[in-house]
Image: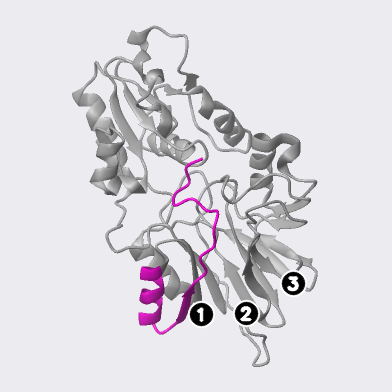
Amino acid sequence: MSVMSVNPRPESPRPESWIRVTSDGLWCEPGGFFVDPVRPVDRAVVTHGHGDHARPDNRAVLATPETLAIMRARYGDGAGGSLEALPYGETTRLGEVDLQLVPAGHVLGSAQAVMSWRGCRVVVSGDYKRSPDPTCPPFQPVHCDVFVTEATFGLPVFRHPPAAGEIAKLLHSIELFPERAHVVGVYALGKCQRLIAELRAVGYDRPIYLHGALIALCDLYRSLGVELGDLRPAMDLPKETFAGQIVLAPPSAITDRWSRRLPDPVVAAASGWMRVRQRARQRGVELPLVISDHADWDELLATLQEVDAPEVWVTHGREEALVYAAEKQGRRARALRLVGFEEDDSE
């Protein structure tokens, strides 16, 4: 895996002199923009399409073409007053800052914001994962002076198993209970399409049924070149149609009245939080699938080593533990305590 390098000049400015936290979010002063602002601003750089990062009604938005397509699909005219696409690897200048977007491996179109000013490079990770995902390019580590990292699963208890093993658990359950539907709770953006692609990758070619709330973004993924196979709406069909089938639905729907149309459903959920058994029980999940779109503890620590930033800023998640671990690696570290971000990517 290639790693972009940086050679800062001795006279480079201190990062806190040009990147700072405000009530609107993370502000890049010489560039005149916010990264993932929490409320509408004049200029936003958006790392990916989840609603706690890509908010509507900014006057100008810069993001990858895929993220802009997701924002248009979700917000229509509210996606932004003007939309500028920046493909991976290309560089643009905003104000005095050179900006590049590189893959984050989180969902389709997700990016890290690489900002360079006067020889100082700051990388804002957005949300990211290090495990393979058939639906998006893998995370690309970038050497930098400051790495601004998420910490959603920033505790040692969170170690995600390979997704293939969790997919095998789902398919084994279908073999054991062919008379029952398997309804899996998935987030509409990213997790839904990844689960489908993981199933297709192991040769599952049967129809996969979708709750209506998931259809539009699956159609968008297909239009952007992600093959998902035979997908069908899970509506207006006889109950027996779903016996032995996989049905995907938003997490909020898997145990409500909607799921009663399914024959004796096995309730499953695909999330990194399924590592916590109490969460699974509280949500009525019979089959927890630990499939996460965020880096786990070991991946967070490995990423800090790879990017090799002397300074680490930690945001949204288990900040204190990762700050301590970064300091044990010999790095300066602090918690940004940004507000307005979810602890996971639920919508």
Residue 333, image x and y in percent?
46, 78
Q: For label 2, count other residues whose C-alpha is less than 10 Å away and answer few (under 14), some (14-19) or many (20+).
A: some
In the rendered view, would you say 144 is above or below 181? below
Q: Is residue 2 visible from the viewing direction of this image?
A: no
The residue pinned by badge 2 equals 15
- What whole-number distance in Å separates the C-alpha atoms at marks 3 and 1? 20 Å
Residue 311 is tagged as: 1
Label 3 sits on a secondary structure element that is: strand
Residue type of the residue flagged with mark 3: Val
Residue type of the residue flagged with mark 2: Pro
**Stretch in magenta:** 320-347
Q: Is residue 154 left or right of residue 136?
A: left
Residue 97 is tagged as: 3
177 magenta-colored? no
Q: For label 1, count other residues whose C-alpha is less than 10 Å away and answer few (under 14), some (14-19) or many (20+).
A: many
Q: Earlier in the sequence, mark 3 or mark 1?
A: 3
Between circles 2 and 3, the one closer to the viewer is: 2
Instruction: Examine the image and state in which quarter residue 94 appears.
Output: bottom right
Q: Residue furthest bottom?
A: 10
Q: What residue is shown at x 41% (from left), y 37% (from top)? A: 195
332 magenta-colored? yes
Residue 181, image x and y in percent?
31, 20
